[in-house]
Amino acid sequence: MLVREQLAKSEYEKLLKKVQDKVSEIRKDSTSRFELPKVDIMWQGNRTFFRNFSEFPKVLRREPEKILQYLSKEFATPAQLAGDKAVFVGKKEPHEFTSLLTRYVKEYVECPMCKSPDTRIEKSNRVHFLVCEACGAKSPLKGQYA
Ligand SMILES: [Zn+2]
């Protein structure tokens, strides 16, 4: 009898542990960092073709021109859109794009309150606000590439 009770108890604990694991897994998912697509580039002469550029504005829900302006300014190099691609003067490494885009996300996409990337930009009286669709926070944006 005692043995059976102990067994039942340990089964129960195991189950409880499983449930707790599951819950923390779900929590982890909902607060997980935003994942950017992998940067795909190609070099030709002294130009860098950012081949899957168009994926980024889609994922980030921002205007391609704004993101391009941001990259161009940060690289201090001219850039232009060519279909789904973006073309930059000079040879850039994929990790340079990745780190700039990660910064762009922090500055213009991620909600500063809850870190959700589900945000949109609202403009009122020449001030841009980042409006979070997850928590409702409205934060002013300081940068000029909103
Ligand atoms: Zn939020």
Image (cartoon, rainbow, N blue to C red):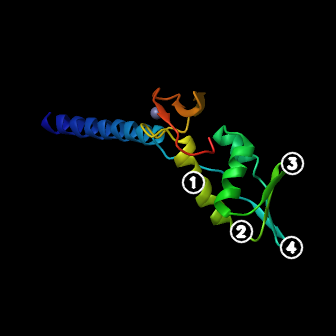
Quarter of image, res 77: bottom right
Query: In the image, is residue 33 above or below residue 38?
Result: above
The residue depicted at 76 percent of the width and 63 percent of the height is 41
Question: Residue 45, labelled with which disc?
Answer: 4
The residue sitting at 49% across, 35% down in the picture is: 140
- Where's residue 25, x and y in %? 42, 41
- Answer whether labels 2 and 4 touch (C-beta < 8 Å): no
Mark 2 to mark 1: distance in Å?
16 Å
> Tag 3, which secondary structure?
loop
Image quadrant holding the C terminus, namely top right
Q: Which residue is mark 2?
A: 92
Q: Earlier in the sequence, mark 1 or mark 3?
A: 3
Q: Residue furthest front?
A: 125
Residue 67, relative to residue 22: is it above or below?
Answer: below
- Determine crowd level at label 4: few under 14, some 14-19, many 20+ residues with C-alpha closer than 10 A: few
Calculate the distance from the C-alpha at mark 1 to the C-alpha at mark 3: 23 Å
Above or below, 106 relative to 88 = above
Amino acid identity at mark 2:
Lys
Q: Specify the label residue 102 is tagged with.
A: 1
